[in-house]
Amino acid sequence: MPGGVVRVYGLLAWTWIRAAAQYPVSMVLLTFATAAVSMLDVAAIMVMFTRAPRIAGFTAPEVLFLYGTSALSFALADILFGTTERLGKHIREGTLDAMLVRPVSPLIQIATEDFSPRRLGKLVPASLVLALALPRLDVDWTAGRAVMIPAMVLAGVAIFSGLWVLTASLQFVLIDGHGATKSVTYGGAFLTQYPLSMFARDFVRGVTFAVPLAFVNWQPGLYVLDRADPLGLPEAARFASPAVAVVVCVLAGFVWRAGLRHYRSTGS
Amino acid sequence: MIEVAGVGKSFTVRRRAGRIRRSRTTVAAVDDVSFEVAAGEFVGYLGPNGAGKSTTIKMLTGILTPSSGSVRVCGLDPSRQRTTLARRIGVVFGQRTTLWWDLPLRDSLTLIRHLYRVDAAAHRARLAELTGLLELGPFLDTPVRQLSLGQRMRGDLAAALLHDPELLVLDEPTIGLDVVSKATVREFLARLNSERGTTILLTTHDLGDIERLCRRVMIIDHGRLAYDGDLSRLRATVDAGRMLVVEFARPCPPISLPDVIVERVQGPRQWLRLPRTANAAAVVAALADRHEVRDIALRDADIEDVVARLYRQVGTLAK
């Protein structure tokens, strides 16, 4: 019942937003702060272009287009599922147990936690970059190319979301060992494994620029820009993003369930 | 309401043995436990730290999957039908809140309403009722992090009861509460059980909870059920006898009398345990013979003594 899941997600997120809106000044300031921090990325790219107008044969608008689509996908996935990286914290503090006695998937509960309009600030730089890059692209616009842009962004959202959930699920295992003891002893040597779960966050960031760039926007991007693949992959690869997205999401769902089953058998 | 048959839960604990190698040992947190709880009962579940109370609760609520045996709650298998069961039970963890720290209590309860899909009208009515009973009014709009422990616990109770569950499971609901808050919580639970007919299972270290609320007590120790029955029979089974508190005119060495056990000495005061069969008058006379006695109090051993003795008995049985 995916419709139900979306509805519950929406209701929970809306409740969080309404709660945040009780402090409007702080909400607006935080949104701007989030946007400002993300703008540093954009500035870095701009600096690169003043130094080298072409990078690996791509013009500035082309690189900005690749960056923009990928960043937009990442920002949307971050907004939807970014808080899943807190799973480790919830396991350590025992709050995951509280989620498990409620009739909604803990994944949705964690993902909507703290949902705030300030998360929308993350969309600002990506949208800005795309708005700058798109009109400057030297591309012969066809219906196919135009449709490909939202399609690649959506597939990218699914891929990044899957990766967030996948890496979050690793924490079910990374926290093991101490946790098993903890459930028996009420004990507290749980702070020692903290760096391991922090690692998951960096892992996500790293993967962000390796794996998905191939399918989130490199391949479909080549189609939009009408470029030959330097690696010579078959033409079909350019339309493979949705399939990759499905595979990543199914895999993420599987690993999440396996992790949860593991947690429920060890209590860690 | 609850049927537990031969349930066990064991954990694998890994220890460092050498630099990389780790040795694995299996620890049974709960071992072959069986009991039933009928609808409308109010059952106290107690045991020392690490005895398996929380593990049992987690298996009943579907958080943990049992290693062996079978569990049925409200006719469902908790580990397989966790989310279905979640709509029919309420759970409160005394040691940690199920509310959200940053949200005002009212918003936390709105989130809960969406999680359980309670419709708006039913929610309003139920919230109004619980607000009255638990006196939530003054702090409904306060963020949870600013609530006192007693207020937070009342908020947690409301959160667990918004969807009107048939069974309420409480894991140490009065831990850390002051006397007044404890009384409020106890009175509320007693009314919930008697007026609404909600079945309640409560774990606690606070024997006052048991004495005030529970007709039936289950005691778990080292993962095994050591006692299951009513409170009065527990007193009779474990002869904790009576406690004689004597205050002498001046400090003196521990008394030595047949049948009398000195439990504690504090200055001129001594706590003496008498078996139920002992003649208290004779003991008092013997004491007065030896030393000058200032004051005397005789009382039945309270539940605390009973349980302490029971734990000890179980310990010796195990050896």
Image (spheres, rainbow, N blue to C red):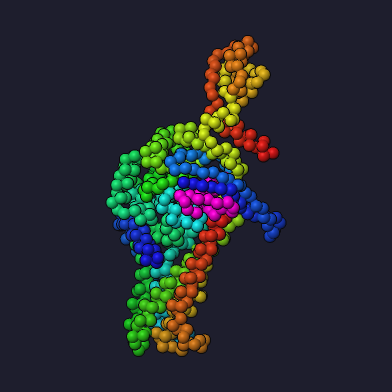
Q: Is residue B47 magenta?
A: no
Please provide percent x and percent y for residue A176. 58, 57
> Is B201 on the left or on the right of A20, as rendered?
right
Q: Which residues are magenta?
A: B52-77
Image height of B232 relative to A147, above or below? above
Q: How many marks?
A: 0
Q: Residue at x 37, y 71 (%)?
A: A125
Image height of B14 relative to B300, above or below? below
Which residue is nearer to you in this view: A266 or A238? A266
The C terminus of chain B: image quadrant: top right
Report the residue that reaches farthest toward the right: B18
Q: Residue at x 54, y 19 (%)?
A: B298
Please provide percent x and percent y for residue A174. 57, 60
Q: Residue at x 42, y 66 (%)?
A: A78
Report the residue that reaches farthest toward the left: B121
Q: Residue at x 53, y 36 (%)?
A: B229
Please provide percent x and percent y for residue A59. 41, 85
Is there any visible trace of residue B183 in the rendered image?
yes
Image height of A94 relative to A29, above or below? above
Please provide percent x and percent y for residue B196. 37, 41
Which residue is nearer to you in this view: B172 or A171? B172
> Is A52 on the left or on the right of A191, as rendered?
left
Image height of A98 relative to A162, above or below? above
